[in-house]
Image: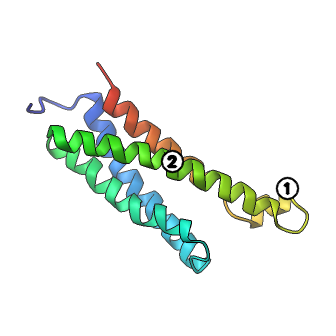
Amino acid sequence: MVWSGWPLERVLFLFVGIAFFAVGFQVALSHYRQNFHHKAMWAPVISAPIFGLCGIALTVTRADWLMYTFMALMWLGVVIGLTGSYLHLHGVGIRVGGYTMRNFLVGPPVALPALFTAMSILGLIAVYWRG
């Protein structure tokens, strides 16, 4: 199937692809700063650029195998993001003082894994979109 124009899903593929590069860069810096002390920190660092490449590739070509690959990667992204949300919330809670505003400010950022999850869900919306 050849792309004709710029339908919404094509724009979403491009946006999600670019966004995963940006989010992946921030995640890599944050996890590098923490010396990757937990092996799960590698999951978003490795997967974000792969997600980004796949999203941008779907903007250029509409191959069925690429669409299925992107769909599977976005489901994986949801799992990675939800796992990260749990780990970041847990990381805030184990700091001295527990779940206080100060620990939310200086501890692991709870919004970043949620953003990773949201970007994956947006990618799934693009996959399942029936305009």
Where does the N terminus fall, quadrant-wise?
top left
Which residue is the site of mark 1? 99
Query: Which comes sooner in the sequence, label 2 or label 1?
Result: 2
Q: Which residue is most to the left?
A: 2
Task: Estimate the x, y position of residue 82 in percent, counting from the top left.
Answer: 58, 47
Amino acid on which the number 1 mark rests in the picture = Tyr
Amino acid on which the number 2 mark rests in the picture = Val
Where does the C terminus fall, quadrant-wise?
top left
Task: Estimate the x, y position of residue 25 in percent, counting from the top left.
Answer: 45, 66
As helix, strand or loop, the secondary structure at mark 1 comes to loop
Task: Estimate the x, y position of residue 111 in percent, counting from the top left.
Answer: 63, 51
The reply to whether residue 110 is visible in this rendering is no
- Relative placement, left or right, of 86 versus 122 is right
Which residue is pictured at 84% across the width and 62% down the height?
A: 102
* Coloration mode: rainbow
- Relative placement, left or right, of 90 versus 52 is right
- In the image, is residue 100 above or below residue 10? below
Which residue is pictured at 8% across the width and 33% down the height?
A: 2
Q: CA distance from mark 2 to mark 1?
A: 24 Å
Which residue is the site of mark 2? 79
Which residue is pictured at 49% across the width and 68% down the height?
A: 42
Which residue is pictured at 21% across the width and 32% down the height?
A: 6
Task: Estimate the x, y position of residue 41 in percent, counting from the top left.
Answer: 54, 67
Is label 2 or label 1 in front?
2
Specify the quadrant of the image occupied by residue 39: bottom right
As helix, strand or loop, the secondary structure at mark 2 comes to helix
Q: Which residue is most to the bottom?
A: 35
- Relative placement, left or right, of 55 versus 99 is left
- In the image, is residue 102 above or below residue 68? below
Q: Residues within 10 Å of mark 2 (few under 14, many from 20)?
A: some
Q: Which residue is most to the right?
A: 97
